[in-house]
Image (spheres, rainbow, N blue to C red):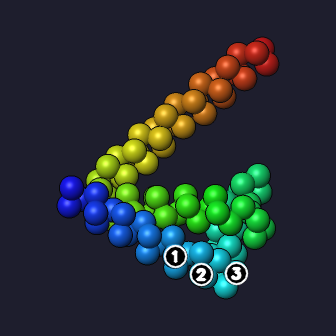
Amino acid sequence: MTIFVIWVIAFVLILFFANKRWDNGVSRGLDKVLPNVLKSHGENRALWVGALAVLGATTLVRPVDVLLVGILLAIIGLVIAKLASFAADKTAH
């Protein structure tokens, strides 16, 4: 129960401050990091602020879990990229 309360407090604080500073830097910082397809250009404020709040609160409460999920997603992405390049090479011949 304590972890849940800490997560909710972190979520609300991150949500509040990200929403408050959306026009002054959060939107521009997010656009610098994301690829063109995902850039917000100041739109979709509620979606991105909520996603940042969930990710930030989870990272504060369970950082090892977030790190392991990130590593797992990177490994899966590398395997898919290698398989796609292998399949592209096979179809080219």
Q: Is residue 91 above or below residue 8?
A: above
Is disc 1 surrounded by few (<14), some (14 to 19) or many (20+) residues within 10 Å?
some
Q: Picture coordinates of residue 39 (x, y %)?
A: 74, 60
Pick whichever of labels 1 and 3 is earlier in the sequence.
1
Q: Which residue is mark 2?
A: 20
Q: Which residue is mark 3?
A: 23
| Residue kind at label 3, given as amino acid type | Asp
Q: Residue at x 42, y 66 (%)?
A: 11
Q: Which residue is mark 1?
A: 16
Tag in front: 2 or 3: 2
Instruction: Give the position of the C terminus as an image quadrant.
Output: top right
| Residue kind at label 1, given as amino acid type | Phe
Res 46 → quadrant: bottom right
Q: What is the spatial separation of the Cα atoms under label 2 and label 1, in whole angstroms?
A: 6 Å
Task: Judge whether residue 33 can be spotted in this image.
Answer: no
Task: Confirm or deny contact between disc 2 and disc 1 (CB under 8 A).
Answer: yes
SS category of the residue bearing label 3? helix
Q: In the picture provided, is 25 more to the left or to the right than 54? A: right
| Residue kind at label 2, given as amino acid type | Lys
Q: Residue furthest bottom?
A: 24
Q: Residue at x 59, y 81 (%)?
A: 20
Q: Picture coordinates of residue 85 (x, y %)?
A: 66, 28
